[in-house]
Amino acid sequence: MKVVILAGGQGTRLSEETTLRPKPLIEIGEQPILWHIMKMYSSHGLNDFLILLGYKGYMIKEYFASYVLRHADVTFDLGANAVEMHDGKREPWRVTLIDTGPTTNHGGRIGRVRDIVGGEAFCLAYGDTVSNVDVTSEIAFHREHGKVATMTVAQPPGRFGAVYMHEGRDEIETFREKPDGDGAWVNGGFFVLEPAIMDYIDGDATDWGDVLQNVAHDGELVGFRHDGFWHPMDTLPDKTNLERYWSAGDAPWKTW
């Protein structure tokens, strides 16, 4: 099963970093968040990736072009004009990089790979979110329901302390520092999709949110509930928080 990753947006809410590089290349630890997402899928045996490029996409191409060189010892034989790699860590990945244009909408980017995906179901992920979602179980869930689309739904990490007060009184009953979610489920950014999803996409301007609304209207969208770790990297504080997990050796999304 192929894994399609959206990696073409400008990441304007993280402009402190994205003025220099595309958002999927922003590092957690010493590796881009894109690498973390791919490692998560690889831990479930999914190693065939289609990465949809846009903003500064050439930098993602350069990242993969030099991947083995960065992770291996190397001998440069200048006289023989030869390069020899030694004991490089090689991922079992097949990576296809597709330039989908700098201004193409999310839905339009997905539509660009209609022919590459072909007639098989595929996974889709946003290129800025890490999670310990059980992809294997999500795929089984998708097959069991037989719908066009399965969306992982998650409860977002809390951003504010929650205050609970007595009814009609000024005293605070209890306080919780940044509780997860408020009972609402949100789009978790991890999908399993049938090829029929392409029939809902009409050109580069197609908005992915509109696609999901239309699929839901047709009764063809189901939610795979994930109550484990889920964390997008939308802002600089988000990045700092993820770095803190990784530096402490306690990254919940590390499933490999």
Image (tube, rainbow, N blue to C red):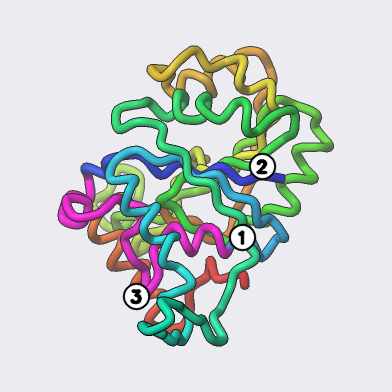
Asked if marks 2 and 3 touch (Cβ < 8 Å), the reply is no
Name above or below for residue 2 compared with residue 86.
above
* Residue 103 spot, x, y in % from top left: 30, 27
* Residue 2 spot, x, y in % from top left: 66, 44
Q: Quadrant of the N terminus?
A: top right
Q: Which mark is residue 93?
A: 1
Which of the two discs, 2 and 3, labels the residue nearer the N terminus?
2
Q: Is residue 125 visible?
A: no
Q: Which mark is residue 244?
A: 3
**Amino acid type, mark 1:** Trp
Q: Which of 196/222 is in front?
A: 196
* Residue 9 spot, x, y in % from top left: 33, 39
- Element at badge 2? strand
Residue at image location 50% in from the left, 81% down from the top = 84
Q: Which of 120/186 is in front?
A: 120
**Amino acid type, mark 3:** Arg
Quadrant in the picture for residue 6? top left
Residue depth check, mark 1 versus mark 2: number of the one nearer the observer = 1
Residue at image location 15% in from the left, 55% down from the top = 16
**Which residues, given as a range, are shown in magenta?**
13-39
**Amino acid type, mark 2:** Phe
Residue that carries the numbered disc 2 in the rendered image: 224
Residue at image location 49% in from the left, 39% down from the top = 186
